[in-house]
Amino acid sequence: MTTITLPRRLVRPVASRPARRSLLLGLAAGIVAGLLLLIGVSLAIGIANAGQVMPGVRIGGHGVQAPNVDAALAVARGGDPVGEGIARLRNLFHPVSIPVTIRGYDEAAVERLAAALAERVEVLPADAQVVKDGVQFKVTPSRDGRALEASTASSAIAAALAAADPADVRVTLEPAVSEPMVSTADAWRAARAAQRMTATLTLAIPAADEGEEPDPALTLKPETIAAWISFGATEPAPYGVILSPAPLAAALQPLAEVVDQEPVSARFAVAGSGLGGVIAGQDGRTLLVSESVQSLVATLEARAAGRTRSSMLLDVRLQEPGLTTAEAQAALPNMRMVSTWTTNYVPGVSNGFGVNISIPAHDIDGTTLAPGDWFSFWGGLGPINTARGYTQGGAIINGRSEPEGALAGGICSTSTTLFNAAMRLGLEIGDRDNHYYFIDRYPTGLDATVFQSEGFTQDMTFRNDTSQPLVIRGFGSPGRVTFQIWSVPSGRTVALSNATVSNHRPATDTTREDPDMAPGTSKRIESPHNGFDASVSRTVRDAAGTVVHQNTWFSDYRPVNGIVLSGGAAPVPPTAAEGTGGGGTTETSPSPSPSPAPAD
């Protein structure tokens, strides 16, 4: 409540003057003519001033002005014609004075005073708020405000001036209380909700392996959660906790490195010459960041409402592998050896004395292909290096055999053997190419070379296009390499044509003298290989007799001329006549050098 005393300068003096009346006594009653004249004049005045203030009417000794017109108009209009006539005549000689009280004040000054009072009285309300201090939340209380409308103050002052003695004017004003938008109670509710949110939260991965070690990144610490919290207007409460999705998404996105994993098909263990048990596979999974953010917000809001939540499942997309553990276990009792092929070779320097063929066979042994899986020869091997036992071996370089021209030379015996096992099972064949020249230990037109060079890779690939898993068994020993394929019999049949040979190009054999060689010695550095073209066709049918694959493989074997290096003719031995005793002649001939094995 506000009480003010108004200064005297706001009040104007009251002007009041008593009215003077005088009555003119008429002349003698006997002057009839005079009376008639006066009556005529009265009527004329009444008619001439119809609707106007009668002459001689004064307000406070002054002419008539609004707002006192109504009182002035009432003079000499009482409804009695005789009385009105007399009154009109009387007013001509004795003007009527209407007493007036003027309540005067400076309206502009009052308005200015009211505005100043409103400004001085006004106090803005202060909202309560929550302030973060680490993982603690403190409340700053609210404060009521007050306000006084300038128009209200102006009206009160005007009323006081009109009704009171100008020397002693007091006006009491009652400011309106303005409440804050956020009360202290609102802020405390928000602080308690935030405090309940800010507790350690463990993020769990659906379908995670029981033995999978939890990653520390999947534990959200209190300070991490507290950093996400802000406060502001919420619905329906005027004030509460705000969780913006953006920082939550930024925090969860890096967890994809922990959560995401590729699906891994189940595998079959190998034992002895057959199969063992099943090695379990695993589902693939992909973290769904947006959905996980929504789950995290819902979990924290549940905590704010008082429900206990110490862990939360992340949202992930699961992907089954090509071969599930259950599918492998169901197939295992029916698995049989359904195809096999063996290649015999001569161990020597060109194949690392067999190690360059046996090591890749052991790498591939036990490979499981789920239905639809592709097999890549190079992708199925471990590292190609000397640390694993590989040596330099034969390679065909620029159309010539180099017995020790490449690391792991001779490995094509492994790729060709596996190709024949897969091809004869009726599987879909991908990459395959023949050797530069024909090697007679391989079936004509059915060899498969592999090599790697800078910028180019020749691979051998095939696909398990059956409905059952298959297992590749590989066996390698010096001089022999074998591959078996195990699967549930599909009923497929394979028909192979005989190789069709054309475009024969015979090779020649030449001898070259090498001055660095001893006379009478020789060494073969290249065996002759005839060139020709070959084609082999394959038709694969399923159990119902429907053609599954129809292939024809073409091979272009190029001619390679043989080369023998010689040290020249051997010296002629002395005759018996030239010797110390008799006897027959003795001839010596150089022992032929063994021909090197083909590069592959």
Image (cartoon, helix red, strand yellow):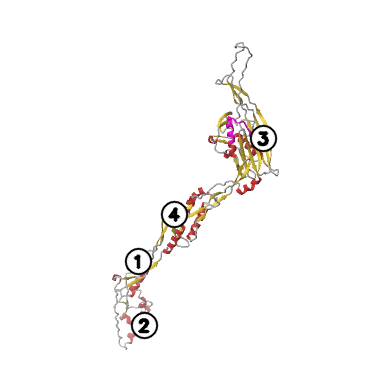
Q: Is residue 492 shown above or below 309? A: above
Please give the residue where the numbered disc 3 appears in the rendered image: 536
Residue extent of the magenta highlight? 343-358
Please give the residue where the numbered disc 1 appears in the rendered image: 121
What percent of the width, then of the height, locates residue 576?
Answer: 62, 12
The quarter of the rendered structure image containing the N terminus is: bottom left
Verify CB contact (< 8 Å) between mark 4 and mark 2. no
Which disc, if any, is residue 223?
Answer: 4
The crowd level at tag 2 (other Cα within 10 Å; few <14, some 14-19, many 20+) is some
Ranked by sequence position, the earlier of labels 3 and 2 is 2
The crowd level at tag 1 (other Cα within 10 Å; few <14, some 14-19, many 20+) is some
Q: In the current view of this chain or complex, which residue is farthest to the bottom?
A: 30
Query: Who's the residue at 49% across and 51% down the image?
Result: 218
SS for callout 3: strand
Ranked by sequence position, the earlier of labels 2 and 1 is 2
Q: Is residue 540 visible?
A: yes
The amino acid beneath tag 2 is Glu
The amino acid beneath tag 1 is Val
Verify CB contact (< 8 Å) between mark 3 and mark 1. no
What percent of the width, then of the height, locates residue 157?
Answer: 34, 71
